[in-house]
Amino acid sequence: GAGVSQTPSNKVTEKGKYVELRCDPISGHTALYWYRQSLGQGPEFLIYFQGTGAADDSGLPNDRFFAVRPEGSVSTLKIQRTERGDSAVYLCASSLLQGPFGPEAFFGQGTRLTVV
Amino acid sequence: QKEVEQNSGPLSVPEGAIASLNCTYSDRVSQSFFWYRQYSGKSPELIMSIYSNGDKEDGRFTAQLNKASQYVSLLIRDSQPSDSATYLCAGPGAVFAGANSKLTFGKGITLSVRP
């Protein structure tokens, strides 16, 4: 597709379970970002990939969170032992790193994660 | 201090008025900034980017960047009810290859345009 695609759009899981959230960026975009957003707040940075490598993972809250992008395209955000506080909308964005105005990032529709 | 701050809002303006949204940042070497619009229940949508001092106009939208004072503004002229949304400021963005281009977002300003 032409835009950033995230699956699933909604995920309800029980506390303590493992979840994977998938992001398929815009074709050709080398940079990929994961954010999470809670109600009434701006997107909170989690991790940023340039190609296959994580250029900055300083936003991952703890070691239960991990993300990969093995082939430089699709990325998966993995959350182990989920907690109720992990409930949020997880947003993925991609950009051309060398665009004329810098990294104009385009977002997917998000995955709403609810931990019960 | 957070990298990008939006401390005002919510903002309510009558239809046809000019809405002015402001954002400050802490990094003096910041390059480019972005304004996103987010409708309730939707994901952020890029509406403006700016990396030079001064004004950049696109239709009813004008972005202003003042690097000396470290602020970014978005002006919406002839505001319409359809402009009612949360506006997010994001930055800084590097414009050179190999640089860390992590974008930090402000918390957003909610704009309501009254018919």
Image (spheres, rainbow, N blue to C red):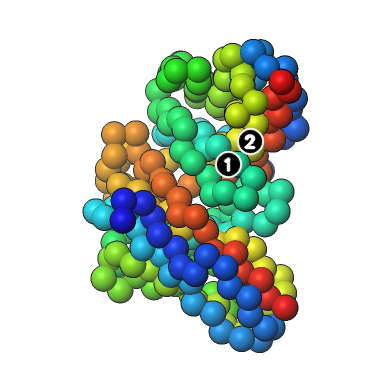
Please, is residue A113 above or below residue A36 in the view? below
- Left or right of residue A103: residue A14: right
The residue lying at 60 percent from left, 61 percent from top is A89
The residue that mark 2 highlights is B85
Write down the quadrant of residue B79 in the picture.
top right
**Mark 2 vs mark 1, CA separation in Å:** 6 Å
Mark 2 is on which residue type?
Ala
- Left or right of residue A64: residue A102: left
Q: Position of residue B1 (x, y in %)?
A: 66, 43
Element assignment for label 2: strand
Q: Position of residue B29 (x, y in %)?
A: 45, 35
Element assignment for label 1: strand
Q: Residue furthest front?
A: B115
Tag 2–tag 1 contact (CB < 8 Å): yes
* Residue B69 appears in the figure: no
Please, is residue B98 above or below residue B80 in the view? below
Camera-nearest residue between B10 and B32: B10
Q: Quadrant of the C terminus of chain A?
A: bottom right
The residue lying at 58 percent from left, 73 percent from top is A11
The residue that mark 1 highlights is B38
Crowd class of label 2 (few under 14; some 14 to 19; many from 20; radius 10 Å): some
